[in-house]
């Protein structure tokens, strides 16, 4: 049981910690809006990781093999959505800097919307379930029980959620330091620019 708990936590951190477009999006969202909104988005990503861990623990490699043929189209959709969100973020920041909006208008982003947005984007990455499936297959043996599956899923979710929360906190701290319009504009351009770059990388890999 302890081995499965540790494996689940390592799996959760392993899938969550590499710097990618979702990571930058959470930090940028939290910096540009508020910790509450950024945290909601972070939990959307953690929820998707938990769902994929649950599916992997329940089905093994079955669903992973079904998703492999459509993995590339799903990544294309995710990349396209990320680019649209980045363009929207930069446009909104430029509009605010010209005086047609205010810093308070950033707060209009609702936590539920951020949660659903990040949940959907993370689900569009089928490599997550393939990753979890490979780990589950390596751990499974005749002694594997339903409780083992529960422990693995909860550990993976807890690890992912804790790391995503750290990202949201980091973004909120950046937002507190860069309170000027120029600071917010710079954060928006750099953060969303990195998202566009990583989305392009997602398309090419």
Image (cartoon, rainbow, N blue to C red):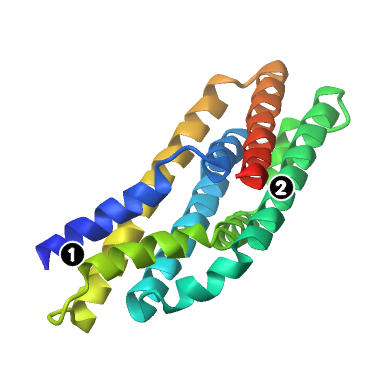
Callout 1 secondary element: helix
Callout 2 secondary element: helix
Q: Name the disc covering residue 87, or none.
A: none
Residue depicted at x 72% and y 52%: 81
Residue depicted at x 49% and y 48%: 39
Kindly indicate whether the residue at mark 1 contacts the one at mark 2 (C-beta within 8 angstroms): no
Q: Position of residue 77 (x, y in %)?
A: 71, 57
Tell me which label, 2 or 1, sits earlier in the chain.
1
Q: Position of residue 199 (x, y in %)?
A: 66, 42
Residue at the spot of label 2:
108
Q: Is residue 103 left or right of residue 122?
A: right
Q: Quadrant of residue 59?
A: bottom left
Observer-nearest of 159 and 173:
159
Q: Position of residue 23 (x, y in %)?
A: 51, 41
Crowding at label 1, few (<14), some or many (≥20) Cα neighbours within 10 Å? many
Crowding at label 2, few (<14), some or many (≥20) Cα neighbours within 10 Å? few
Q: Is residue 151 left or right of residue 104?
A: left
Judge whether 107 appears above or below 138 on screen: above
Q: Is residue 86 left or right of residue 115?
A: right
Q: Position of residue 124 (x, y in %)?
A: 60, 61
Residue at the spot of label 1:
4
Cα distance in 3D space between marks 2 and 1:
42 Å
Observer-nearest of 17 and 178:
17
Report the number of discs.
Answer: 2
The quarter in which the C terminus is drawn is top right
The quarter in which the N terminus is drawn is bottom left
In this rendering, does residue 47 appear at all? no
Q: Is residue 185 left or right of residue 58?
A: right
User: Which one is in front in this view, the residue at disc 2 or the one at disc 1?
Assistant: 1
Q: Quadrant of residue 62?
A: bottom left
């Amino acid at each position: 049981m302890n081995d499965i708990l540790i494996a689940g936590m390592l799996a959760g951190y392993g899938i969550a910690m590499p710097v990618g477009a979702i990571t930058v999006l959470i930090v940028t969202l939290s910096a540009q809006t508020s910790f509450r909104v950024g945290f909601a988005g972070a939990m959307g990503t953690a929820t998707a990781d938990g769902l994929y861990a649950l599916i992997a623990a329940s089905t093994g490699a079955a669903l992973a093999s079904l998703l492999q043929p459509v993995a590339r189209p799903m990544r294309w959709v995710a990349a396209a959505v990320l680019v649209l969100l980045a363009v929207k973020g930069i446009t909104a920041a430029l509009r605010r800097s010209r005086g047609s909006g205010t810093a308070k208008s950033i707060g209009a982003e609702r936590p539920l919307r951020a949660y659903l947005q990040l949940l959907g984007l993370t689900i569009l990455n089928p490599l997550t379930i393939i990753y979890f499936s490979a780990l589950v297959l390596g751990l499974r043996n005749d002694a594997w029980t339903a409780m083992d599956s529960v422990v693995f899923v909860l550990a993976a979710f807890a690890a992912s959620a804790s790391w995503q929360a750290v990202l949201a906190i980091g973004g909120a701290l950046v937002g507190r330091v860069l309170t000027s319009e120029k600071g917010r504009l710079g954060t928006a351009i750099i953060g969303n620019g990195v998202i566009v770059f990583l989305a392009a990388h997602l398309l090419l890999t």
